[in-house]
Image (tube, coloured by chain):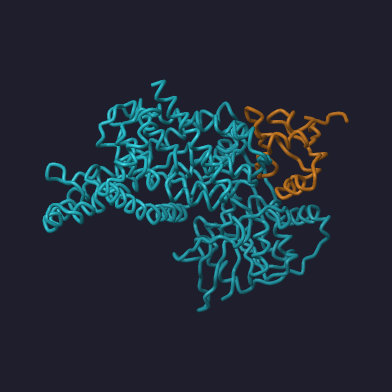
Chain colours: A cyan, B orange
Amino acid sequence: MKKILLIGNPNNGKSVVFNRLTGANVIISNYPGTTVDFTQGKMRIDEEEMMVIDVPGTYSLNAGDKAEEVAVKMLNSGDIVVNVVDATNLEKSLNLTVQLIKNKKPMIVALNFWDETKHKGIAIDFQKLEEILGVPCVPICAVTGEGIKKLTERLKEAKTSKFSYEDKEKWHVIGDIIGQVQKLTHHHHTFMERLGDISTVPVFGIPLALVILFFTFKIIRFIGEGLIGYVFEPVFEKLWSPLLLKLSVILGSNGLIHDVLIGKLIKGEIDYGQSFGLLTTGLFVPIGAVLPYVFAFYLILSILEDCGYLPRLAVLVDGLMHRLGIHGLAIIPMMLGLGCNVPGILATRILATRRERFIAVTLLSIAVPCAAMQAMVVGLMGKHLVFGLSIVYGTLFVVWIVLGVLMAHLVKGTSPEIFMEIPPYRRPHLRALLKKTWIRTKWFIKEAIPFVLLGVFIVNILYTLGIIQFVGKYTAPVISGVFGLPKEAIGALLVGFLRKDVAVGMLAPLGLSLKQLIIASVVLTMYFPCIATFSTLLKELGFRDMLKSSAIMIVSVLIVGGLLNIIL
Amino acid sequence: MNGLISLADMKSGQKGRIVQIDGGGGMTRRLDALGLRVGKQIKKVSKQLMRGPVIISHGNTRAAVGFGMTQRIWVEIEKL
């Protein structure tokens, strides 16, 4: 099968072009031996099926970071190169184009954001550009789909360019081309451009960031609660419960199988928070209580990502993050981690050095609660929601800062400085946005549900065998002595290793005081990450660093839990 | 040299031309990839608190440059 490579700068709409060209069957893979991911899909031209590969965005073929190394390797294995170019930014884009030309692969250039050039007072003679470069040049607007048909029609005209130049003359040559094909007319800065610039000025940018974060969480709660209250709970209560009650009767209302599948009936009814069977609590926690928040979270995060806000946030927090030994871009894995720690840890791959990754991963797994955990804590706090959550989040934030500062001083290695492009604000493309949200949500469903079911199953078995009671007796000094929690909470702490949300759910029937709830929530967040996170941690850090990270975690949870017990 | 100032010391809103980059091949290559090189006209858009990065614009491109790097990029300010 022929391979078509989409190559271009980051943030130039390449993924939207990719979405336009390919169908639904898209696979994200990891380039062997690296931490760089790429996406591939299929398209059909004149009955011939071809593979389309979305090569990681790159500015040049020799700058030497990992994404660029991968881009160069992939380039050698491709048959046709589609160079996606940002028409509003010809100089920067042509830098890559003229390097690609030297590679002598059949090539075609797609000039994206063609519609935007008009607002920006840029006129490009694309036929002239085609003449100079000696490869087809097609203006497109990927978001609206204009020009995509033309691009696919002309794919077979892709050819090797005869254009040649001396490497040291590169910028001169590019300047020359631009002089011939591009005419600029004066234009007034658009509102979006002004907003784009002003949101990186601290006086305006920091309040704006706080407003955006505030609304982000408001909207996530609104969507999450709406979905739970109007869709998921009614479905579980009205449709699923009657079925389960019938099953309960068939199973004889008690016995091992009944208890594992359905759990305890509370006053003859199913209580999804307390019954604790596989089909009751085991299904309700991931689907009914957590999934709506995870979906809402990823939807909003993808919007922030696609409209170009996240790099600006990274810039605003860079100064602070440097004190923690990581740079501003690390805010992205941290935010992803608020959804689920696993993709958060995977996203630390955008950080260049081992030191940065170790610090980011450790901070993430200790002080960043995932959506599942948060959703359950919200449910648990009840009428003390605002006060309880403020203490929990406040404590975690302080831990995040203090641990970061400590590690910045103690962990050896270097953390490079931030240097990145700040893309203009752009309207996100709905289909690409939904696709991304769906891929992330699907990932949660696939990863979380089996673990929740396993967790609930194991809890039932451990209880039946009396193991939890046994461990509880021996760990009571730490649990009640240090943390001030009743020894029944040990069950939750053990399960927390499998799934944090299930663990928080187990605290509900214990009748904890507000102080105990706060301590339990903080301890559960900080101590051992769930098994999915833990295995990712091991994979990404390796055995030795995983041990180090875990040691930091155990020490900090004992100190923080103990302090809270004394202070509160 | 007269009128030469580091990118870190430029004021927000000021325009100028890069005349010297005190950095190894790595830093020069990274800057070059985004079109930043000796001779390039730039404008400082904003700077951050706590020695955070500096935002510059050149043409339609905006870039965030780490504070340490900005101390090693020398600019000749454009006279108004």
Which residue is located at x 80 percent, y 30 percent?
A: B5
Residue A416, quarter of picture? top right
Foreground residue, A486 or A10? A486
The reply to whether residue A222 is in sight is no
Which residue is located at x 64 percent, y 32 percent?
A: A409
Foreground residue, A500 or A497? A497
For the N terminus of chain A, the image quarter is: bottom right
Residue A367 position in % (x across, y down): 48, 36
| Residue A362 relative to residue B60: left or right | left
Q: Residue furthest bottom?
A: A47
Residue A515 position in % (x across, y down): 34, 26
Residue A33 position in % (x across, y down): 61, 60
Foreground residue, A271 or A542? A542
Residue A271, quarter of picture? top left
| Residue A321 relative to residue B38: left or right | left
For the C terminus of chain A, the image quarter is: top left
| Residue A504 relative to residue A546: left or right | left
Tally the marks: 0
The answer to whether residue A294 is above or below residue B76 is: below
Which residue is located at x 79 percent, y 35 percent?
A: B75
The answer to whether residue A548 is above or below residue A518 is: below
